[in-house]
Amino acid sequence: MSSAVEFAKANGGRFVDELKDLLRIPSVSTAPEHVEDVRKAAEFVASGLRAAGLEGVRLIETSTEPSAAKQGRKGHPLVYAEWLHAEGKPTVLLYGHYDVQPAEPLDEWKSPPFEPTERDGNIYARGAVDDKGQMWMHVKALESLLKTEGKLPVNVRVIVEGEEEVGGEGIAAFVREHGDQLKADAALVSDTEMFAPELPTLCVGLRGMIYTELEVRGAATDLHSGMYGGAAPNPFVALAQIIAKLKDEDGHVSIPDFYDGIEEPTADELKAWKSLPFDEEHYRKTEVGSTELTGEPEFSVLERTWSRPTMDVHGMPGGFVGAGAKTVIPAKALAKISFRLVPGMKPEATFEKYKKYVESIVPKGVTAEVRMIHSGEPIVVSTDNEFIAAAKAAMGEVFGKETVFVRGGGSIPIVGDFVRELGIPTVMMGFGLPDDNLHAPNEKFHLANFHRGIESIILFLDKVGAA
Ligand code: BES
Ligand code: MN
Ligand code: MN
């Protein structure tokens, strides 16, 4: 065993305690009331990187995140660090995010979201696995190497963002404008999941997305529904009618030309997916918990979630939602609607098709406006490089099994920019589990995976340095 791995094992308890301190900071990037907490989390990460022995540690201000601009404040800062003394060795860019999704609904949590609690070998808290816990593995792997060997096997740059959960516009602008400051030979991202417990997994593709708001307006003001019901347009009914026309009963999106140009997975990829240990009934019962699965019947569940685009509605704010009853015809109605995109689809082009289609189906008496909140491109990474080989070997060694390749249905907007803007291969080595409840109540991180993750990252960096 390498001395760095021994160090990580001996200090594992402290690593978890530190992670708990980070998890106590409610760094919800979408919530204006948490701006200061988000910054506190950034400072915490910066201190952790300094203590680990990284150099040039600093916060980089961002300004482009649209909701930030609307609120008249700066974006959430990036955290940067480097260690560049491994002459002649490759440079690895380590990426993670310290922001988290909102914790609501709070009454569904068995222990409070920002009071990290250990139960059955798991740590429960918002951000435990997505992505504070996984980002902290990077920091602790670097610390373990630097404290035992006094150096790293490769050159390292670290970039940690605080706006991933709100679209990642700030880091995208930084990569576009100052890509030279992140110059590297490959990126390592730990923000994805393993396909099954104990099964080492590399994620090689992510869906892109456009996140939109659809606003429908009817009467000039809210109206008494008895006095005007029957004559005045109801924007919620109109909104429901529009939404009902976006997707048919078999899960096909009805927007004209929506599927144009989509790139199918290769035959090899599809074959590999078929051999993954996937039990649809088990998935339905334990992960989804519905009476049936829905979506395009001509595609498998893995295809439906990894390589097919979809539309989803996240919420419909507005009107009367308080306890009891209020007889009102609201003047306006809103829906938060997103589309997941797959390779071959462009966010802007998809948005234009959607907008045009909505405008063509607006019911009588109302107006509709669609707005883009944020977007990100889909990505499939190449697997034919020494960095993927090193990651496959490292993870396989730690878990004692052959590493599988999967795609993820989720989105990490900056990964597309690493590949397209920086032109570097990206390794997505994640340690989440299918039942970790990302974005949901009772998010957790399996502690054994936190420790095996640190070990895998140490081995990965060693292998990249030795090649
Ligand atoms: N870590 C997730 C993305 C993810 C999860 C990828 C599981 C693969 C498997 C990330 O934090 C996330 O949730 N991203 C958002 C992005 C969006 C807000 C732009 C998503 O996918 O909804
Ligand atoms: Mn994440
Ligand atoms: Mn997330």
Image (cartoon, grey):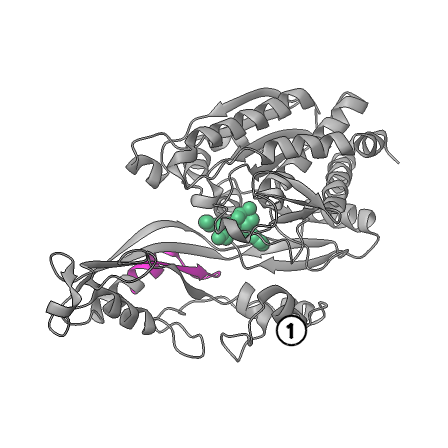
Q: Tell me which corner region of the image, top left, top right, bottom left or bottom right, holds residue 365.
A: bottom left
In this rendering, is residue 358 above or below 135? Answer: below
Q: Is mark 1 within 8 Å of ligand 1?
A: no
Q: Position of residue 185 (x, y in %)?
A: 62, 37
Q: Tell me which corner region of the image, top left, top right, bottom left or bottom right, holds residue 44.
A: top right
Judged from this view, the residue extending furthest toward the right is 1
Taking depth in this image into account, of 192 and 380 the one nearest to the observer is 192
Taking depth in this image into account, of 82 and 69 the one nearest to the observer is 69
Q: Is residue 181 magenta?
A: no
Query: Can you say which quadrant of the picture contains the N terminus?
Result: top right
Q: Describe residue 396's horizontal placement relative to residue 135 as left or right.
A: right
In this rendering, is residue 396 above or below 340? Answer: above
Q: Secondary structure at mark 1?
A: helix
Q: Position of residue 104 (x, y in %)?
A: 48, 49
* Residue carrying label 1: 280
Residue at the spot 66% in from the left edge and 50% down from the top edge: 432
10 Å crowding of disc 1: few (<14), some (14-19), many (20+):
few
Residue 440: in sight, yes or no? no
Q: Describe residue 43's horizontal placement relative to residue 185 as left or right.
A: left
Q: Describe residue 178's horizontal placement relative to residue 109 as left or right.
A: left
In this rendering, is residue 410 above or below 144? Answer: below
Q: Position of residue 204 (x, y in %)?
A: 61, 55
Q: Tell me which corner region of the image, top left, top right, bottom left or bottom right, holds residue 353.
A: bottom left
Which residue type carries mark 1?
Glu
Highlighted magenta segment, given as a residue range? 335-353
Query: Can you say which quadrant of the picture contains the C terminus?
Result: top right
Residue at the spot 41% in from the left edge and 30% down from the top edge: 62
